Amino acid sequence: MTTVLVVDDHALFRAGLLAVLSAMDDVDVVGEAANGEDAVAAVESMQPQVVLMDLRMPGIGGLAATARIAERHPEVAVVVLTMSEDADSVFAALRAGARGYLLKEAGADDVQRTIAAVARGEAVFGPRVAEQVVGFFSSESTASTVPQAFPELTSREREVLELMARGLDNAAIARRLFLSEKTVRNRVSEILAKLRARTRAEAVARARDAGIGGAPG
């Protein structure tokens, strides 16, 4: 039996989903929430195995709630269940720590299979979402045949460097990547050390010279 928390701000949709889940023999709905703050609190008190999370909600929203749950309770699998299928939403959810991403048009069987899979530690995406994920990594694989600048940096450090080169400060980078500002400061320090850059401005200049983050506008 898999324990599940349902999070959605639309009461009618939430009620319908609860009815569907309640008819599943292997699912036990332990609670519901209508916003991100309540979702985080409910995870703390109810300890579900799986959270079905909407993205667009009042307050901190589904992405920030997912990031907090993933950080504090990595054993809890968050599955995003949303109307949004754009690439930005998909990859923002993955960066936040979601282990699954389904569209609200998914059938009951798909939802049931997804709950069981993520409870086992798997990652699951709906068909149209999976196409975007596969397409992204296929393009990344093709791009990887071209030598990258600064191979000494990790993928996360390259991501931080790119945002630095776009002009974002540490607070903005932290929000974009769902990290703490302290973590971002540490990443920046590591980048400067690896690039042997004396200042942040020098690292940004080198990044832009290498075509990372675009030229200053």
Image (tube, rainbow, N blue to C red):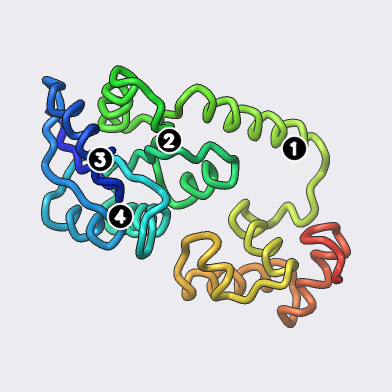
| Residue shown at the point (58%, 68%) measured from the top left | 173
Judging depth in this view, the residue of 34 and 213 nearest the camera is 34
In depth, the one of 196 and 47 nearer the eye is: 47
Mark 2 / mark 3, whichever is N-terminal: 3
Point out the frontmost of discs 2 and 3: 3
Element type where label 1 sits in the image:
loop
Q: CA distance from mark 1 to mark 3?
A: 46 Å
Kind of element beneath mark 3: helix
Which numbered mark, 4 or 2, is in the foreground of this view? 2
Measuring 79% from the left and 58% from the top, which residue is drawn there?
Answer: 212
Whichever of callouts 2 and 1 sits on the residue coming sooner in the sequence is 2
Residue 75 in sight in this render: no
First-in-chain label (4 vs 2) = 4
195 shown above or below 34 = below
Q: Quadrant of residue 37?
A: bottom left
**Label 2 amino acid?**
Tyr
Q: Which mark is residue 101?
A: 2
Which residue has dot 3 on it? 12
Q: Residues within 10 Å of mark 4 (few under 14, many from 20)?
A: many
Q: Position of residue 86 (x, y in %)?
A: 58, 40
The numbered mark, 1 or 3, whose residue comes first in the sequence reads 3
In this figure, which residue is indicated by the disc labeled 4?
69
Q: Amino acid at mark 1?
A: Ser
Dots 3, 4 in contact, CB < 8 A: no
